[in-house]
Amino acid sequence: RDDLGAGNEASTRVASILFHPKEAERMGVERIYDIGLNGLVELEQTKEPRLRNFRDNLFSSASSRTERALLTGQENKELDESINKVLRLIAPHMLQKPAQKIFEYLLRRFEIHVRNVDGVFATIMPYHDTILFGRVVGCLVFSNTSMWGFLRKLRNVCRKTPTRGGKMNRQTLANQCIKEPTLLNFICERVREACVSSPIGCRVYASFQIALVNDILDSSSKAKESVVRVVMPYVLRGV
């Protein structure tokens, strides 16, 4: 479950992966909508035609003015489902500008950095060694006791220099998976979803998973049994 703790952070800082917070703060709803729609159309036409299915809901003019705080629990649940579907579709293309524009729109209009932290991490985890990773992490709002608490040091650094981003060594993630096997299980499940979603996504995520598991096994002989217990069900299913 995504953690809505530390809510005051969200209200004091404009989240953005494309612009400096001060510049982002000056952008109105229509400008953010134009950026998101531009990214959607371009990625839909060049890489991912299934994004067309979201033109009339998430990317409609009316939806661009949605205030999540005013939605019912059921409405937010349905919105979360649509958002997570879009995140899975853009994930294999996140290093490309159109996907980043879509992400920016979801960030600004639907508060995914607060309400969909699990989905956001799943989207960027294969890109942990790029500056994009730090830009996204710098936006996230989570409590230090959540599964994402290990990211807080990187988040704090990235917030001081929001346009520069920051990278995370894969070994850091491997070490955290050893400490918290539920994180490894989360990653394996997201890889499975990526492989179901598209061949491109499967290549990106499966390569990341293989490298991560190898790092875990190389790091600790004690971790091997617990890692095998987590990973084996996915291996048996062919993921």
Image (cartoon, rainbow, N blue to C red):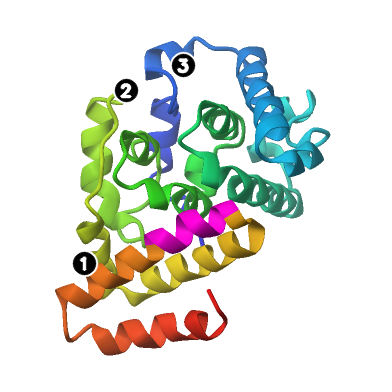
Residue extent of the magenta highlight:
200-208
Judge by depth and name the residue closer to the eye, 121 or 9: 121
Secondary element at image label 3: helix
* Residue 59 sits in quarter: top right
Q: Is residue 36 magenta?
A: no
Residues packed near mark 2 inside 10 Å, few (<14), some (14 to 19) or many (20 plus): some
Label 1 residue SS: helix
Asked if labels 3 and 1 touch by Cβ distance under 8 angstroms, the answer is no
Left or right side of 33 for 60? right
For mark 3, what is the residue?
A: 24
What amino acid does circle 3 point to?
Answer: Ala
The Cα atoms of the two marked residues, 2 and 1, are separated by 27 Å
Instruction: From the image, tell me which residue sits under label 1.
Output: 175
* Residue type pointed to by label 1: Asn
In this rendering, the answer to whether 122 lies above or below 57 is below
- Asked which quadrant contains residue 174, the reply is bottom left
Residue sitting at 62 percent across and 13 percent down? 31
Residue at 44% x, 29% y is: 15
Q: Is residue 66 visible?
A: no
Q: Which mark is residue 12?
A: none
Is residue 97 shown to the viewer in this render? yes
SS category of the residue bearing label 2: loop
Residue position for label 2? 163
Magenta stretch: dominant SS? helix
